[in-house]
Structure formats: C-alpha cells, structure tokens
Image: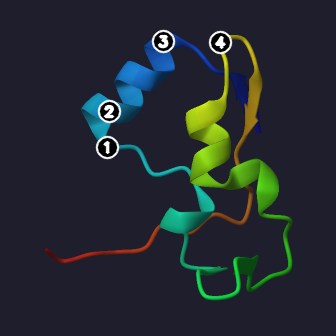
Amino acid sequence: MWIAMSECYRQERERYHLKECCEDCHHFCPERQRCAVMYPVAPHLKKTFENAQDDERIYFCKMFEAEVSCD
C-alpha cells in the first residue's frame, strides 16, 4: 500500500504515534538492517519516510507487525 506524503500525514503520524517503518516492525533485524522474511527494507526505513517530500509516494510493507511494548 502507498500514500502520497503530505503535511497532513506528518501531523497525523506525530499526533497518533503511528508506527510505519521497518524499525518499528517485529520482523526487522536492526543489527543486520534486514527483514527476517526477506522483504526489501530500503523503501520502508524510517529515514526514507522522514526524507520523503510532499506528494512523493511512501510505501507501507504488507508484512508489517508492530513491536509491542508494555511501557
């Protein structure tokens, strides 16, 4: 799935603490910068989302499983 990056999305991401990136996913191995199910990580990394310009497509991984924290 993809959406076009926008200021509205940036505000919603901040307001609702949305999780969207590999770094937030249960399948991501940070030491190796790889996905445990072998999906490409480059389009889904936090830096990719942070650097996206308005109207640029950002892609969400269909295998995303959020890390659960009980903090």
Vertically, is 7 above or below 60? above
- Residue 58 lies left or right of residue 40; in this view the side is left
Q: Residues within 10 Å of mark 4 (few under 14, many from 20)?
A: few
Question: How far apart are the two marked residues, 1 and 4, measured between alpha carbons?
Answer: 20 Å
Closer-to-camera residue (63/58) = 58
Q: Within the image, what quadrant is residue 55 found in?
A: top right
Residue placed under numbered mark 2 in the picture: 14
Q: Are marks 3 and 4 in contact (CB under 8 Å)?
A: yes
Residue beneath the point at 86% across and 79% down: 38
Indicate the secondary structure of the residue bearing disc 4. loop
Provide the residue designation for mark 1.
17
Separation of residues labelled 2 and 3 (CA atoms):
11 Å
N-terminal-most mark, 3 or 1: 3
Q: Residue furthest left?
A: 71
8 relative position to 33: left or right: left
Camera-nearest residue between 1 and 21 = 21
Is residue 59 positioned above or below 28 on the image?
A: above
Residue type at mark 4 is Asp
Q: Amino acid at mark 1?
A: His
Report the amino acid beneath label 3.
Glu
Q: Considering only order in the chain, which callout, 4 or 3, is on the residue closer to the N terminus?
A: 3
Q: Which residue position holds label 3?
A: 7
- As helix, strand or loop, the secondary structure at mark 2 comes to helix
> Splitting the image into 4 quarters, where does residue 70 fall?
bottom left
Residue neighbourhood size for the residue with mark 3, other residues' Cα within 10 Å, grouped as few (<14), some (14–19), many (≥20):
few
